[in-house]
Image (tube, grey):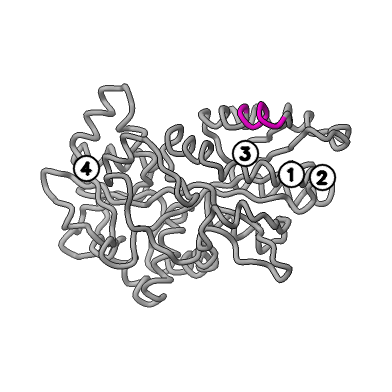
């Protein structure tokens, strides 16, 4: 059983009515299940004196809970780890518009929601995860997979390992491809992926990396922070896996590599709005952005932030060209993408 589930009751009890009257409290619903984030919360409390109460769950669970609680919800800040879920919450009216020059100056426009009619912003990207191709170094080179489109080339029949098409990481990529290629070409590309699968979709991104290293398939898709985690692991078995594979950031010569985001927002019925804004601004600060990079192997989003993560730098030299389409557009394509997946038999 996940620690998140065990914490839910205790955290819910902590988010009680008397807490609303306190000046130094902040109630967070978080889908970020990373132990390294504890340092972020601790540092914020030390710097501001604001006590954090937290409920941990996955993205879908958080959105369901917000809807069920309605105006009685104690949540102030919402942290989610997928663009499509941020967009869904925006559409469902679960967020409060924020006006913050600090956040607007720090976060690029394509990594935050479009401004509302009153000039506020409903959510902000706080870190990114690039969706890259890993491949068997004995069989292929970077040039073989330097674009996402090449994954559907018939010459790679039986070579692709991939997780479920309906997982948010893949839905995000497929939504971006729809924006770049249009629906008709994207559906043909998805059919090509199905034809090239080495096995039915299963497992998580780490499982796809290991399958390539084991020779079960020739290439796979993964988010960079899974690969970086293995590269930095003290486990010899993980090191052995990473030594057998290569990694390529696709579409560097065209629109750039797809990135998904982890982001934050203020809950529509927040009781501690000022504290919530301070927290989001803190997460966009250089120190917090460096923590996302060094602590959880994510790419910082704030402008001008440098970092020192050996695994991320080893992949790219420290930087890469990422696509610049609005994340909100990716979210809007999700329903269309799911229909395509059903038609081409992508499970």
Task: State the CA–CA distance, disc 3 to disc 4.
Answer: 33 Å
Q: Residues within 10 Å of mark 2 (few under 14, many from 20)?
A: many
Task: State the CA–CA distance, disc 1 to disc 2.
Answer: 6 Å
Question: Residue 267 at what x, y percent from top left?
Answer: 73, 50
Which residue is pictured at 19% across the width and 59% down the height? 157
User: What is the secondary structure assignment of the residue under circle 1?
Assistant: loop
Task: State the CA–CA distance, disc 1 to disc 3.
Answer: 15 Å
Question: Residue 194 at what x, y percent from top left?
Answer: 31, 60
Q: Quick check: can you spot residue 209?
A: yes
Foreground mark, 1 or 3, reads 1
In the image, the segment drawn in magenta is 42-48
Q: Nearer the viewer, residue 265 or 179?
A: 265
Asked if the stretch drawn in magenta spans residue 44, the answer is yes
Q: Dot 1 corresponds to which residue? A: 76
Mark drawn on residue 271: 2
Q: Main secondary structure of the magenta part?
A: helix
Which residue is pictured at 32% across the width and 72% down the height? 188
Q: Dot 4 corresponds to which residue? A: 216
Q: Dot 3 corresponds to which residue? A: 57
Report if the CB atoms under discs 3 and 4 are less than 8 Å apart: no
Question: Which of pointers 3 and 2 lies earlier in the amino acid sequence?
Answer: 3
User: What is the secondary structure assignment of the residue under circle 4?
Assistant: loop
């Amino acid at each position: 059983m996940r620690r998140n589930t065990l914490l839910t009751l205790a955290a819910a009890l902590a988010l009680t009515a008397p807490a609303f009257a306190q000046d130094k409290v902040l109630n967070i619903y978080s889908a970020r299940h990373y132990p390294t984030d504890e340092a972020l919360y601790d540092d914020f409390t030390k710097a501001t004196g604001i006590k954090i109460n937290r409920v941990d769950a996955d993205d879908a669970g958080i959105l369901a809970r917000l809807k069920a609680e309605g105006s009685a919800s104690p949540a102030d800040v919402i942290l989610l780890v997928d663009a499509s879920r941020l967009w869904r919450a925006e559409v469902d009216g679960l967020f409060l518009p924020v006006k913050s020059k600090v956040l607007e100056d720090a976060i690029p426009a394509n990594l935050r929601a479009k401004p509302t009619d009153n000039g506020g912003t409903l959510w902000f990207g706080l870190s990114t995860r690039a969706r890259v191709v890993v491949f068997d170094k004995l069989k292929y080179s970077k040039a073989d997979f330097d674009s996402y489109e090449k994954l559907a080339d018939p010459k790679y029949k039986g070579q692709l390992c991939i997780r479920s098409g309906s997982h948010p990481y893949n839905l995000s990529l497929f939504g971006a491809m729809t924006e770049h290629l249009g629906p008709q070409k994207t559906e043909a590309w998805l059919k090509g992926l199905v034809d090239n699968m080495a096995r039915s979709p299963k497992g998580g991104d780490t499982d796809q990396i290991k399958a390539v290293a084991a020779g079960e398939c020739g290439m796979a898709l993964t988010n960079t922070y899974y690969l970086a985690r293995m590269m930095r692991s003290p486990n010899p078995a993980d090191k052995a896996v990473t030594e057998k594979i290569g990694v390529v950031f696709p579409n560097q010569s065209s629109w750039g590599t797809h990135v998904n985001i982890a982001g934050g927002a203020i809950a529509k019925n927040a009781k501690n709005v000022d504290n919530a804004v301070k927290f989001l601004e803190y997460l966009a600060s250089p120190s917090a952005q460096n923590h996302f990079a060094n602590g959880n192997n994510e790419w910082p989003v704030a402008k001008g932030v440098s970092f020192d993560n050996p695994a991320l730098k080893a992949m790219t030299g420290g930087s890469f060209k990422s696509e610049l389409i609005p994340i909100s557009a990716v979210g809007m394509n999700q329903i269309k993408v799911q229909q395509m997946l059903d038609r081409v038999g992508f499970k």
